[in-house]
Image (spheres, rainbow, N blue to C red):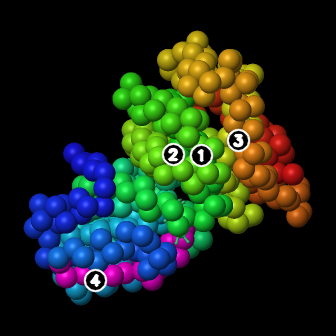
């Protein structure tokens, strides 16, 4: 069971509780500039730092981290960073503990929950973006031979998620927008996912309500209270998708990221309103076993939580958030071949979580609306 704690001052207590003597830190290039670096450096343990990877990490990057961890014999892992750092740390932990080693991270084993043997390595995650919720999920994203791999294993869920919102002060404005949109989309998608439960829906509702209420002051006023609320919201959204998984907007976003170099949250957010509109107008294509009335009720609950009078107004509100933040849709260079490539890229397994059936023709029509 994961512990979620608030405040960087808790780090020393956690390290003591897990009896850490030598800490393996996974950090990205922003670490030297973070306003929590001082507190982390003060922690009274030996430290080995790994930061030789880029955003959207590659398998080769993770392998360097595995080699360093193995030769340094550390007894705990601390990830400090956005989704990329936390996911690298998760992959290192899995590869070190799985009998299959680093093969557990790549096909064909990546789609299986391999057993973890060989003892435990306490794992602490401090998110420095408010978006992915990776600090509270059992997934890690990494790229192998050019394609995105999602490692799913209960053993990679951090034992501790330590939330310190003051760290968001240095996050660049565009990154703030992208990561917050990722959290908002996660909250909405998880709510309508066919795998949702009462627990995940509670998390989704909290995430969507908090973001709807605080996004402006977080993005435009640099308000510290709003930043704390958005960090909580992102964590709730992460806990929601940890139960339900994401749906079509995430599935359709991955090729947008690789083709147009849009960061993850931006790519998901350009897909979501078009899919949402389509689902509202095609209830007859509902594939949620709980039925179309159930699904339509969920759409109404989502609108309510956003302060909208009905589902179509909620979609407009979402579009207005994008417009106010000046988040633009991608522009095609060779439109037709790109649209065909996009429509062919969507993983059908991921679409099974979506409450409305999206066939190949519909995917193409949706991409025609998403890509300008
Ligand atoms: N594991 C999961 O459950 C999950 C969920 C969603 C997304 N993801 C993955 O997470 C990755 C994206 O993560 P992300 O959006 O958090 O971004 P990121 O971790 O890739 O970081 C983006 C950039 O922001 C900088 N940065 C981070 N925090 C900063 C701070 N406080 N101050 C200044 N700069 C800072 C980093 O150095 C980096 O350059 C993608 O690979 C995505 O697929 C994982």
Of the numbered discs 2 and 1, the one sitting upstream in the chain is: 1
Nearest the camera: 301 or 228? 228
**326 w.r.t. 292: above or below:** below
SS at circle 2 = helix
Of the numbered discs 1 and 4, the one sitting upstream in the chain is: 4
Tell me what residue is drawn at x 11 percent, y 60 percent. 17
Label 2 crowd bin: few (<14), some (14–19), many (20+), radius 10 Å: many
Q: Which residues are magenta?
A: 45-63
Kindly report the distance in space between the C-alpha atoms of the residues bearing marks 1 and 4. Answer: 37 Å
Residue 157 point in image, percent of width and height? 31, 54
Residue 286 point in image, percent of width and height? 62, 22
Nearest the camera: 237 or 115? 237
Identify the residue under disc 3: 321
Identify the residue under disc 2: 226
SS at circle 4 = strand
SS at circle 1 = helix
Identify the residue under disc 1: 217
Q: Are marks 2 and 1 in contact (CB under 8 Å)?
A: yes
Of the numbered discs 2 and 4, the one sitting upstream in the chain is: 4
Quarter of the rendering containing residue 86: bottom left
Q: Is residue 62 magenta?
A: yes
Identify the residue under disc 4: 48
Q: Are marks 2 and 4 in contact (CB under 8 Å)?
A: no
User: Left or right of 332: which side holds 38?
Assistant: left
User: Is any part of residue 279 visible from this angle?
Assistant: no
Kindly report the distance in space between the C-alpha atoms of the residues bearing marks 4 and 3. Answer: 41 Å
Of the numbered discs 1 and 3, the one sitting upstream in the chain is: 1
| Number of numbered discs on residues | 4
Foreground label between 1 and 4: 1
**76 w.r.t. 303: above or below:** below
């Amino acid at each position: 069971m994961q512990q979620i704690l608030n405040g960087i001052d808790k780090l020393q207590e956690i390290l003591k509780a897990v009896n850490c003597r030598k800490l393996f830190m996974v950090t990205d290039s922003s670490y030297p500039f973070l306003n929590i670096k001082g507190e982390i450096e003060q922690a009274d343990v030996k430290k080995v730092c790994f930061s030789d990877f880029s955003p959207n990490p590659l398998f080769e990057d993770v392998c360097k981290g595995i080699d360093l961890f193995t030769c340094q014999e550390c007894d705990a892992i601390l990830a400090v960073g956005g989704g990329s750092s936390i996911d690298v740390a998760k992959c290192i932990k899995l590869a070190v503990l799985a009998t299959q080693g680093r093969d557990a991270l790549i096909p064909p084993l990546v789609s299986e929950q391999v057993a973890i043997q060989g003892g435990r390595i306490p794992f602490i995650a401090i998110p420095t973006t408010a978006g992915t919720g990776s600090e509270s999920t059992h997934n890690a994203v990494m790229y192998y031979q050019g394609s995105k791999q999602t490692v799913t294993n209960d053993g990679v869920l951090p034992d501790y998620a330590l939330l310190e919102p003051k760290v968001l002060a240095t996050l660049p404005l565009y990154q703030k927008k992208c990561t917050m949109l990722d959290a908002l989309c996660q909250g909405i998608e998880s709510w309508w996912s066919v795998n949702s439960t009462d627990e995940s829906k509670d998390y989704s509702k909290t995430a969507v309500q908090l973001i709807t209420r605080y996004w402006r002051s977080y993005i435009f006023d640099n308000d510290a209270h709003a930043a704390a609320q958005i960090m909580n919201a992102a964590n709730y959204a992460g806990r929601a998708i940890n139960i339900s998984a994401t749906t079509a907007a995430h599935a359709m976003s991955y090729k947008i990221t690789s083709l147009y170099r849009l960061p993850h949250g931006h790519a998901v957010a350009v897909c979501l309103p078009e899919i949402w509109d389509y689902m509202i107008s095609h209830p007859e294509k509902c594939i949620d076993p709980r039925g179309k009335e159930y699904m339509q009720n969920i759409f109404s609950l989502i609108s309510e939580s956003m302060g909208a009078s009905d589902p179509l107004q909620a979609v407009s509100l979402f579009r207005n958030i994008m417009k106010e933040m000046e988040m633009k849709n991608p522009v095609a260079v060779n439109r037709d071949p790109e649209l065909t490539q996009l429509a062919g890229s969507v993983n059908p397994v991921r679409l099974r979580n979506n409450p409305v059936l999206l066939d190949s023709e519909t995917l193409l029509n949706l991409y025609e609306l998403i890509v300008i």
